[in-house]
Amino acid sequence: MVVADLHVHTTNSDGALTLETIPDAAREVGVEVVAVTDHDRLHPDLQTPVAVVSGVTVVHGIELRVRSPAGEVDLLGYGARRTDALTAEIDRLQENRIERARRIVDCVEDRLGVSLDVAFEPGVGRPHIARAIAESEADYEYDDAFADLIGDDCPCFVGREIPDFETGRDLLADACGLVGLAHPLRYDDPAAALALTESLDAVERWYPYGREVDLRPVERAIERHDLVPTGGSDAHEETLGLAGLDSEAYQHFRSHVRL
């Protein structure tokens, strides 16, 4: 039974949940601990590494995309504190996100001849644009927007300016109590991604890939590098507990993260 969902997004980035709605969503599926890991942002209403919100333990985290020898990968930081260096990098990333979103929207509007309702503000990402496309007069569903227009290598794709692996890892290591690799089997080269865990604290062991995967490489990396196994649903909608830690795994996580 999942008691800790350690990969959850809120409206602070591209999720649907808020701090106010997380407790009810967690109780509905028996989840007792939630880590808020918004993309490239710390949550403005979480001032401590861990808090209790309406009876649910909320770990303050962040998901940071970095450039690595394995390509672009995502790092998860848990037990986040605000440092000047991380705050400055987050501000830079959000400015780039806004400019990127404007360029993508301009391309889509020119291509489809529609007007998209997108708020160009911190946290904006491709999911916001895909939703706007689906809600417009264009004949596109959310998934189709990614597949045909704004996904990687699509005609309206625009890349982001992200830190390199070492810079991102060091920023998170200074600000967070535990730093791990997110969803290692989602990358084009999982072996190269898992090799990065040699200099990390943790790796996401439980994740809803939506397909059958061979977890043995992840298990070997955990054993080889003495990693803390983490996990979560990567929730962008309002359903929690699709993946995560049972009670024993959470206690192991809790004993290793510095809060």
Image (cartoon, rainbow, N blue to C red):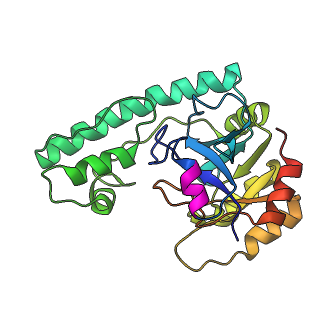
What percent of the width, then of the height, locates residue 184? 65, 62
What percent of the width, then of the height, locates residue 166? 72, 38
Residue at 22% of width from left, 37% of height from top?
A: 106
Residue at 14% of width from left, 49% of height from top?
A: 112
Vertical position of residue 84 compared to residue 147: above or below: above
The furthest residue to the front = 54
Q: Quadrant of the C terminus?
A: top right
Residue 138 located left or right of residue 59? left
Vertical position of residue 37 compared to residue 121: above or below: below
Q: Residue 2 appears in which quarter of the rendering? A: bottom right
Q: Magenta-highlighted stretch: main secondary structure?
A: helix
Front position in the image: 67 or 206: 206
Residue 98 located left or right of residue 31? left
What percent of the width, then of the height, locates residue 102? 30, 33
Residue 145 located left or right of residue 181? left
Q: Is residue 72 visible?
A: no
Specify the segment rendered in magenta.
23-28
Q: Quadrant of the N terminus?
A: bottom right
Residue 158 located left or right of residue 228? left
Residue 24 forms part of the magenta stretch: yes
Residue at 71% of width from left, 62% of height from top?
A: 3
Residue at 54% of width from left, 56% of height from top?
A: 25
Q: Is residue 86 visible?
A: yes
Question: How many numbered marks have been drawn onto this rendered protein structure?
Answer: 0
Front position in the image: 188 or 61: 61
Vertical position of residue 106 compared to residue 47: above or below: below
Q: Residue 128 appears in which quarter of the rendering? A: top left
